[in-house]
């Protein structure tokens, strides 16, 4: 496999050097080259897509549009020959390590709590477990009445979320908050307050919609990003429990990630940039393509896309009307991947990368 990758690299660089030796010349500016009556500028300074587009516009151009294998070889060949000056090590591996750490901690907490829970020996556990506020079932407004001391149900800061759970006192990391309570149903008509649970071959859900049956955890809303996510869940058989994954200070809202399907319903995606930009890969921004109603891809100037080179692992989905492209080098070859929404892990979705501008000669 290593030899095969070496051959791919050598082949690509030979093609790129041949193309550049035939078609390139200075085009007016540092790191600017000419190819078939177009000028390309290669920017090592990392920018967001919007900022990169602005820089290209100031140059009289646009983020590069790749229309052929030859054009891609020219661009990728230059990037590869100058990789030490264009690229630095954009490393998101710390996010992966943090996720792995949280999963290990979750496994330990789940194992210890469930062991004592099923044996009836929770008093022997080393975990910090909140005392349950016992309220009889079917009382009006039971859900709010079960709220333990140190918490309150107040208006959420999450848009369209209505009420939320707020801390009135400091809550340490790894505090077991409570069991999520509700009605067990097989086919809920509204999934807003539902958790799917382990129930063998059939699907079973805990539905906390009814405030006279459920408890205070029904008011915990969905986190929009990793910075505000402070709560997670684990299962003990068919029961689901909430716990804190970080210290939560007073006057903070408890927020949990409710899963991919629920997130999509709220237009939130939990995509770790480490998955798209693994350590050691080379990544440069190029132009965007657009999916039209007649089910075809077009470029920014409405010309049809005539060439693509999607990664086998990550292709643009036709449901995305606009797709920003990344020219990426990994596994011994240059490929395309669609730029996705990384805002769950990166503030302001500001993944900044080198980029390539293109303009017509004379502009």
Image (cartoon, rainbow, N blue to C red):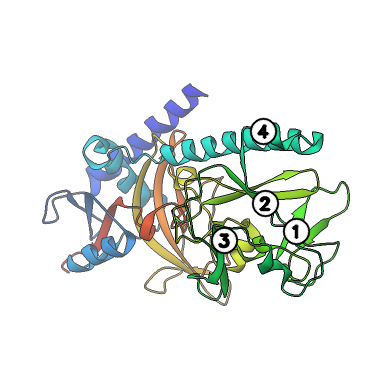
| SS type, badge 3 | loop
Q: CA distance from mark 1 to mark 4?
A: 22 Å
Q: Are marks 1 and 2 in contact (CB under 8 Å)?
A: yes
Dot 1 or dot 4: first in sequence order is 4
Tag 3 residue: 317
Q: Quadrant of residue 95?
A: top left
- Name the residue rendered at 33%, 61% in the picture: 49
Give the farthest residue toward the right: 201
- The image shows residue 81, relative to residue 190, as above or below, that is above
The residue closer to the viewer here, 58 or 159, is 159
- The image shows residue 297, relative to residue 270, as above or below, that is below
Q: CA distance from mark 4 to mark 2?
A: 15 Å
Q: CA distance from mark 3 to mark 1?
A: 38 Å
Q: Are marks 4 and 3 in contact (CB under 8 Å)?
A: no
| SS type, badge 2 | strand
Tag 4 residue: 125
Tag 1 residue: 181
- Name the residue rendered at 13%, 51% in the picture: 26
Rendered location of residue 249, percent (x, y) = 44, 53
| SS type, badge 4 | loop
Tag 2 residue: 178
The residue closer to the viewer here, 107 or 305, is 107
Q: Are marks 1 and 4 in contact (CB under 8 Å)?
A: no
Dot 4 or dot 2: first in sequence order is 4
Q: CA distance from mark 4 to mark 3?
A: 48 Å
Mark whose residue sits in front, 3 or 1: 1
The residue closer to the viewer here, 23 or 170, is 170
- The image shows residue 75, relative to residue 120, as above or below, that is below
Q: Quadrant of the C terminus?
A: bottom left
């Amino acid at each position: 496999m290593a030899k095969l990758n070496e051959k791919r690299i050598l082949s690509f660089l030979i093609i790129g050097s041949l193309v550049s030796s035939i078609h390139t010349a200075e085009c007016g500016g540092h790191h600017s080259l000419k190819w078939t009556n177009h000028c390309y500028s290669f920017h090592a300074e990392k920018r967001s897509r919007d900022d990169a587009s602005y820089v290209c516009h100031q140059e009289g151009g646009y983020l590069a549009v790749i229309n052929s294998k030859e054009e891609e070889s020219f661009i990728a060949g230059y990037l590869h020959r100058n990789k030490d000056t264009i690229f630095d090590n954009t490393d998101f591996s710390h996010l992966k390590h943090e996720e792995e750490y949280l999963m290990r901690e979750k496994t330990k907490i789940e194992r210890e709590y469930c062991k004592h829970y099923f044996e009836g020996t929770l008093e022997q556990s080393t975990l910090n477990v909140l005392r349950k506020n016992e309220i009889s079932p079917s009382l009006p407004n039971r859900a709010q009445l079960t709220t333990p001391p140190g918490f309150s149900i107040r208006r959420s800061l999450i848009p369209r979320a209505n009420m939320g759970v707020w801390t009135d006192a400091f809550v340490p990391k790894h505090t077991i908050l409570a069991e999520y309570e509700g009605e067990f149903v097989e086919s809920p008509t509204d999934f807003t307050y539902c958790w799917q649970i382990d129930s063998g071959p059939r699907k079973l859900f805990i539905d906390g919609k009814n405030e006279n049956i459920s408890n205070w955890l029904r008011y915990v809303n969905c986190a929009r990003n990793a910075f505000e996510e402070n709560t997670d869940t684990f299962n003990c058989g068919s029961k689901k429990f909430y716990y804190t994954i970080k210290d939560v200070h007073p006057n903070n809202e408890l927020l949990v990630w409710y899963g991919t399907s629920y997130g999509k319903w709220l237009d939130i995606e939990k995509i770790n940039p480490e998955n798209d930009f693994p350590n050691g890969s080379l990544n440069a921004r190029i132009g965007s393509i657009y999916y039209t109603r007649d089910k075809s891809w077009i470029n920014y100037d409405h010309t049809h896309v005539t060439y693509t080179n999607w990664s086998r692992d990550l292709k643009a989905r036709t449901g995305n009307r606009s797709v920003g492209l990344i020219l990426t080098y990994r596994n011994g070859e240059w490929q395309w991947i669609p730029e996705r929404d990384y805002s769950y892990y990166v503030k302001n979705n500001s993944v900044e990368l080198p980029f390539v501008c293109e303009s017509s000669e004379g502009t």
